[in-house]
Image (spheres, rainbow, N blue to C red):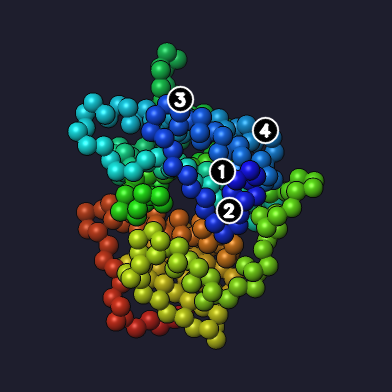
Amino acid sequence: MDDGLRMVEVGTCSAWPLPGDPTCAGVARRMFRRAAAGLAVEPAAVDDGVTMVSELVANTLHVQLEQRPQQRQLPRGTPELWLYLRGSGPRRELVCKVFDSFPGWLRGNVPGRGVPRPPADALSGRGLEIVHELSRGRWGHHLTRSRLSGWEVRGKAVWFAVPAGAPRAGVTGPWAREPDRYARMAAGQAMTELETGLAARGFSGRMVRADDPAADMAVLSVCTGLTVWCRAGVAWLRAPGLSGHQWSFSDLVEVAEQTVQAYETLAARDEPPRFADAARTWALVPV
């Protein structure tokens, strides 16, 4: 593919495997620059994004090389680069995530925004500091599952986002406006799209769904305590610790990402979540 429009579009997440050797940072830089080239990303933001993705991938490689002498068997899967669009209009942004299955951060033990600055003579540890500065705080990390090596490969994703809102002159495409199909989409249609995405992430046959077309509402139970709701153009999650954030139907990729993250966070606890009872009867009451 030669242009970013075909690589990253509304409603899809593009994913590529990254080599587990010193060439991985260069590959990630090229893929990010190609993907951002046709989008509404300002040149300075593209350059910042190239630097940030290089730092994230270099960190993954550093952990991999550190662990090789200590592990007889390396974790399954290779690092992955994920790109997708989130938000709409002038608030739209290009989200970049680097996934790996190496242990270390699997229970949230990751350097945060408040970590001390590394010593001046430190040879490593500055990558997240650089990402924090260049992204202006638009970065984070979460537990998740592989997209390319099979859903059973679990690990973490570290992400950042750059603005991709106002289109540049002469650039058109399905990403440049809110697609009509999402503006007209019924709750049942949105839930079908979301359910398909979650099935591809390993939840097939484990979810329980109920629809109320008359109320333009649908609900999907993923496991005990984790449900997804769609109603009148809006989707939201109910899960422990979530603040009730809502997304439009054009952000179903983000909803699926948040759902997988919420499940993996629950699964990392001492008592793994139980999947929904297929015989359960739902009372569709708006919340």
Tell me the crowding category of disc 2: few under 14, some 14 to 19, or many 20 or more residues within 10 angstroms, Cα based: many
- The answer to whether the residues at label 4 and label 1 have Cβ atoms under 8 Å apart is no
**Residue name at image x 54 percent, y 33 percent:** 29
> Which mark, residue 96?
none
> Which mark, residue 44?
4
Answer with mark 4 or mark 2, whichever residue precedes in sequence: 4
Quarter of the N terminus within the rendering: top right
Q: Secondary structure at mark 1?
A: strand
Closer-to-camera residue (189/225): 189
Q: Which residue is mark 3?
A: 126
Tell me the crowding category of disc 3: few under 14, some 14 to 19, or many 20 or more residues within 10 angstroms, Cα based: some
Q: Which residue is mark 1?
A: 161
For the residues labelled 2 and 1, the Cα–Cα distance comes to 9 Å
**Does residue 30 show up?**
yes
Amino acid marked by disc 1: Ala
Q: Which residue is mark 2?
A: 86
- The answer to whether the residues at label 1 and label 3 have Cβ atoms under 8 Å apart is no
